[in-house]
Structure formats: structure tokens, C-alpha cells
Amino acid sequence: MTADQGETPAETTGAVDLTEDAKVEAADIPPAVVAQSLSQYLRAWWLQIRSGNSGVLPVVLAIVIVAVVFEIITPEHAFLRPSNLVFIFGLSTVYMILAIAETAVLLLAEVDLSVGAVALIGGVITFKLVQNPGADWPWWAAILAALAICGAIGAVQGALTAVVRIPSFVVTLAGFLLFSGILIILIGGADASVNLNTNDPNQNIIYELVQGLISPVASWIILAVAVVAYGVAVWLRMASRRRQGLVAPPPALTAIKIALVAIVGVAVVVICNYNRGSALKSVQGVPWVIPIVLVVLGVWTLVLGRTRFGRYMYAIGGNPEAARRAGVSVPGIRIWSFAACSATAALGGILLGSFFFGEYSTNTADPGQLVLYSIAAAVIGGVSLFGGRGKAIHGILGGLLIGGIAYGVSLLSLGSLSTPLEYILPGAVLLIAVLIDVLSRRGTGSARV
Amino acid sequence: MTADPGETPTGTAGAGPAGATATDLTLDAKVAAADVPPELAAQSLSQYFRASWLQVRRGNSGVLPVVLGIVIVAIAFQIANPKFLSAQNLVNLFEQSTIYMLLAIAEIFALLLGEIDLSVGLVMGLGSVVVAELVQPTGANWPWWAAIIATLLACAAVGAIQGSMVARLKMPSFIVTLGGLLILEGVAIIVLGGSLVGIGNSQYHNELVLYDIFWGSFSPLVGWILMIVVVALAGTTLWLRDARKRRHGLEAPPRSLTAMKIALMAVSGVVVVAICNVNRAHFGTIEGVPYILLIVLVVLVLCTILLQRTRFGRYVYAIGGNPEAARRAGVSLPSIRTWCFVLAAFISGIAGVLFASWQVSLTTNIIKASNSYVLLAVAAAVIGGTSLFGGRGKTIHGVLGGLVIGGIYNGLYLLGVSSQWIDVVVAGVLLAAALVDVLSRRGAQGQA
């Protein structure tokens, strides 16, 4: 834990040292832990940004810039229309989920190049299992089976990395080739496709994962329940910490956080409840995929931030030798991380199939491009490639940025220039993001030779 | 240079104070013999073979696994399909493998540093589009040689930019070349302009020359003459070098070994030319040594000399072995690193010219497909015996590894296996090669 205490255990490093060397320590531990008042918190936060721990700030800024620029330059200023925003979210879902999956291995300073191919395999398995006539499994069993199979794939790749010690880069490169081949075999050939029949209620549920909408009224109710639940949970935790004499964020900060979540939630619901269809056939409501992504985000945030498994992941990413000496079973954690990565990726693959109107073919997605985009999304979001630094939210924001760029470019009527720009812009954004990562690390004095 | 003494000291020991190795030999003969190349330690042929065997046992197996791999691939496919080892198919197989070979050699320059270049496939794609566009009679209409030079320079410039980002800005090569390949894909599509560019029009001299680079051959007689010249040149150089070493009292391989090496070269030269001179056309005549064989040979020899016989090459191995030690020894890390990426991109550019000639007409889909070659290039280098951890590898590994991949593709294709199954097999071979790499390193570390 030498280089990047940034996200690491909030519990272990206390506020004790603060008096000794306030400035250095304040930059190294999360502001939420040290600050006792709102102004202290903001000052500590600013200090952290100055010292290179900029967190989500760059990617949020980038999203705002991309949104403003595309809104200005797209014909008829169409980029920020509700229909487009909802579509962008659907398009970005797969990048978001795959970026979160990739984060799980990037945190360990490993990389998984097979994440795209494994995701598509998960999607095809689910689609195959609900076919009727065919296996005709219930939808939840099909999804669970896909997650389990892909988790097992991840565990095998993880074992080759963690136990046999083949570099993850090569293991997953071979995995990429292997599963790209198997994917085509599963689909049934390069020209075949696997389709969902929306008339079958069981298959329709999988179709609706991205395409389905929650009715406007239900959207408001769900939002209210979610915000209240979140607020109560955060407030109670803060209160209990305070009661037990632990360091807790100032109440004003907690209130602001809850208010911020509520505002974002209301904005999303308002946008989604706008009628995107025509006067004859109204299309409105929050897509199912938004709560699904939020659940994935919540689960991964809890796993990374609140469980022993998550702490061990950060510990290994920061310094594997130190983690080993502290008694962490490094191979075990590595294997589980790869398994969790692949299982999460499978979910992304299922959502991808649903986004493409329930059709899986070799045209649905190119596994090579998927993996490039998901690594790019994670890194752009703020996950470090050197391990030990990153959160689930980074994957979400990075995925949104990539999806926004891809869709924004397609909105511009650039003719033959639009295809190349879909490659050039993410590449350029990726390079800039890593440059910021590297330069900010240089500021903290932990650059390589 | 702590972990992998295998290939590193060849250059240093050979050119510098080689006496040191001989003195150590008496102290602890077994350890030293395993650490220095058998050419230097052995005084007679039998000693040489014993030293080589010891080295293989110690995990420094060099090209042995990949040569074994080639033999196994050849036997297995020959049993499955008797056409596999026919003269026609062998030439065909070699032609298909050339792209893998060149890209693997390019990749080796990055791997030796302990870096990776994911963009070699698309640098090749960009190079192929640029060279094809430049000779278009309705467009730029450059002479073919100017187009090739411009293409190679353009590719080298791409490498210089990426290399500077890696070496000077200290960005991870993995991400720089990942972002780079996305950008290059876009740039290549922009250069392509419309949907298609071709070089198949035999009315135009420049297009014809480009086409012939991949598809043309020397006439049988020229093939023989060339072979004799090449073998005579290589043999004389080898013999004179060993003689000079002996004269100066340096360690030199036994005379019988040098003679055997020359004989081996002559025999393989005769076999290759004999195979290539068989008529391989279904109708009419296509015979002779393909031009690309000579191109690959030249690239191989130049890169081998650069890596094994020059100060630059020694620095590359030093950085791959231990960058901090190399830096303290006064090696300028940024410039060596940048140059390696320039060379990788330059060689990918050569592959790009061949690629354009091979494909004849280029489309957006072919440009996108060129990206998949990078994985096969890494696979070829690793299968050939180049370590992923830096500091261990030779250019010949790329050629041999490329031959294995080309052989697998060709053999499975002959058997009517669809491409997705071929990917599955290549994945297995790559894993096996990486496993050999890891296990051999573990063996070397466990005993050292």
C-alpha cells in the first residue's frame, strides 16, 4: 500500500496521523475520513485533486464537454433530446458492465483480453437456453447458467494466471482466440443467428431487459423508494459510526450526497418519462436496464468497498508481496477476481443481445472491439492500469463517455468520415486519459524507471 | 541481467572480454557451461553437443521447442492429408506465413524491452492502404519505389510517435498502442477514402511491380544462382569470423562445427530452391523461388545482425533484462525504447507492402481484419521462443513461430476445418508455448 492509498482501506488508516503532517496525510487518505466539517472536506478534496488523486472529476468533466460539444455541432441540436439520451444509455450499457468487469482484474494489475468474447458467449448461452422449441429453460435459470459457465471460464483463466503464473495478458489473449472461435460455433456458423421470440413470455423477459420500459408512475415510485432506502442507509451508517466514536463524514456532506442522488434520480426519471414516441403510440418510462445497471454498480461498490474480498483486491493491486506477507491468499483472490470479472461480463453480453432487439449473430458485436472499448472505458473512467486504484462507478462513467462519443459521431452527417471518427475519438480520449493518469502519478512520485 | 542469462551475454561476451567466460569455466564448469552459449565454451564438437544439451536441460531451450513443434505439425498434417508436404503446398504455406513472420519480428523488438506493441497489425493495414493509394494512376501516381519508401517512412513515423509516448511520457505501451490502433484504424479508413483500392491492373507498370512483390518468383536458374551466392557469402563470413577469433586467441567454436553449419546451410538452401522450382500451377507454369522468401531472409539477417552484433542490440537486451541496471550503466533508455518502436513499425510497414500485394484489392473490412494479425504476431513470437518478460528472444524465433502458425492455418484449411476451429487450435498452441516459457524460466530460476 505504498503508492496509492487513494481508495484503499478507509477503515485502517485513521485520522490519528492528521496532526503530525496534515498536508501529506490529508492528500493520501479519503477526505470523507479526515474531515469534520463541510469546509474541511472540500479543502481536503481539493488537496487530493491537486496531488493527482482526481477520482471521477476528469471523466465527469469530459462527459459534460462531450455533451455540450455534440449538442452544439449535431444537426438540429439533437444530441441531448430525451430519446437520444435514453438510446445512448442503452448503447453504453454493455461498455459500462464490461468496464466494471475489467476493473475487477485491472485492480489486481492484471488484464483480461477475453472479456468481450466471454461476454458474447454468456449472451449466446442465455439465448440458446431459452429457445422454444429447444432447451426452453426459465429465463432466470438461463441467466444463472450463463453466469456460472462464464464464471467457471474466468476461474480457469485466473488459475492459469495465479497458480501456473502464465502472464494474464497471454492467458486471456489465448482465451480471446479460443472463445471467439467457440462463439461462432455456438451461434452455428458465421451467417447464422440466434433470435428471441417475443411472443413467448419467457423469452420476452430477456428481450425486455434493455428494450422494456417501466411505466411512468411506477418509475416515480421506484425512484422514491430507491432514494429513501439509499438515504436511510447512508444516514444510519454515518450515525452509527458517530455513535461508536469512529470517524464519520460531516452530516452536511451526507445530506448533500443524498440530495445529489435524489436530484440525479429525478432528472433521469423526468427525461425517461418524456414521450419519445409519436402522438399515436407513446413511448415513455424508465428502461429496465437503468435499475439493472444500478444494481450491478451497487453490488460491485459494496464488494469492493465493504468486504474483505474487496480490500484484499486493493491490497494485492497495491503491493502483492505485502499482501502475501499480510496473510492474504493471493492466488485465491486472483482466481475469484477473474471469475467475478467473467461472470459480470456475461451479464453485459446478455444485455447486449437484448439491446440488439434479441438477435445474436456474428454481426452483433466484434469481441476484439468490445474488449478494447471496455478497457478504454475503465481507464477513461479513472481505473489505474497499475493496479490498486479504481471503483465500479469509474466503469459506469467511462462507458457512458464512450457510448456518448460513438452515438454523437453517428448523429453527425459526416458521410465517409463518420466511421473513422468512431475509432479515432475513443482512441484519442483513451490516450489523453492515460496521459492524465501517468502525469498525476508522476506528481505523487511513483513513476516507473 | 539477473534472471535470464540465456541470450543476453552472447553479444557482450562475443565482442568484449570473452576470456572471462573461459576462466570461470574451470571454477564451476557445470554452472558456467549452462550460462554461456555452447559456441563459446566448447572446444570440440562433442563438448559442444554436451553443453547444448545442458543448456536445454537448464531451461534455455532456445529454438528447440518450436522446431519440434514444426516437425510435429508437419507429421500430423502429412498423415491427415498427403498433400500437406507437397512442393506446391509448402511454397503456398510459406507465402501465407510471411505476414506472420514479419509482424512477429516487429513484435519481438517491443517484447525484448518487456513492452508490447498492439498496433503492429493496423500499422500494417495503414501501410498497405498508403502504398496502394500512392501508385494509383488516377491518383498520386507515384513510381512504385517512391511509394514504398514513403509508406515505410510513414509507418516509422507512427512508431516514433508511439515510442516517444512510451519512452518519454512513460505511458504504458499496452495502452499507447491500444489507443494508437484505434486511431490508426480510423486514419486507414480515411486514407482508403472510397470503399476499395486495388493494385491488380496489369496495364500499369507500378501496380504490376507491387503485385509481383508477393506473387512473383525468380526464374529457376536465377534461384539456383542466388542460393549459391547467399550460401557462399554466409559461409565465408562465418568461416572468416571464426578464423579471426581463433587467430586473436578468442574463444571460437570448433572448426568441425563451423563446417557443419555451412553444410547445413547449403543443404537447406538446395532443398528450398528445389522445392520452389517445382511447377506449382494447375495450368501453365508457376515456378521458382518467390521474391518474398528473399525479402524475409534479408529482414531476418539485418535484424539479427542489429540485435546480436551491435551496441544498440546489446542495449535492447540490457533494458529488457533490467531497465534500472541498464540506466545506471549509462544506457539512454528513452532513445533505445523509441527506436525499438520505430523499428517495429518500420517492419510492420514492410509487412504492409506485402499485405497490399497479397490482398490485391483492399476494402474497409480488410483494414479492420488487419487488426487481428497482432494477436497472431504475439502468438508467433511467443511460440517461437521469445519471452514475454523481456530480454530473451531472437529474430529467428519470429520466423519459426510464424511458420508454425502458418502451418496450422494451412493444414487445417486443407482439411476443410472452418476458421473458428483454427482459432481454437491456435489458442491452444499459444497457451502451450507460454506454458513452456513460464516453466522453463521457473526451471532456470530454481536451479540457478
Image (cartoon, coloured by chain):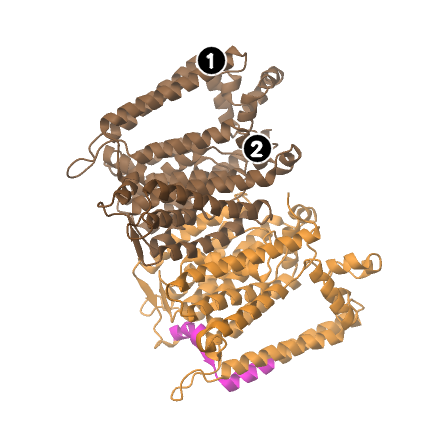
Chain colours: A orange, B brown
Chain to which mark 1 belongs? B
Q: Is residue A222 magenta?
A: yes
Q: CA distance from mark 2 to mark 1?
A: 27 Å
Badge 2, how many Cα within 10 Å: few under 14, some, many 20+?
Answer: many
Q: Could you say which quadrant of the image residue A263 lies in?
A: bottom right
Q: Residue at x 58, y 22 (%)?
A: B31
What span is colored magenta in the figure?
A: A202-225
Residues flagged by tags 2 and 1 on a common chain:
yes
Question: How would you rate the neighbour count of disc 1 (Cα within 10 Å): few for under 14, some for 14-19, many for 20 or more?
Answer: some
Q: Amino acid at mark 2?
A: Tyr
Residue A315, horizontal then vertical, whole percent: 66, 53
Seen as rendered, the residue at the extreme left is B283
Quarter of the image for residue B298 reads top left
Q: Position of residue A286 (x, y in %)?
A: 50, 79
**Where B174 sits versus A200, above or below?**
above
Residue topped by disc 1: B243
Marker disc for residue A391: none
In the visual, does B377 lie left or right of B94? right
Q: Quadrant of the C terminus of chain B?
A: top right
User: Which residue is nearer to you in this view: B136 or B388?
Assistant: B136
**SS for dot 1:** helix
Instruction: Give the residue at x 49% y 38%.
Output: B109
Position in image of residue B250 (x %, y %): 54, 14
- Point out the image quarter for the N terminus of chain B: top right
Dot 2 lies on which element? helix
Q: Is residue A43 left or right of residue B362?
A: right
Q: Is residue B231 left or right of residue B18?
A: left
Residue B56 seen in the figure? yes
The residue tagged 2 is B315
| Whole-percent x, y for residue B344 in the image | 47, 41
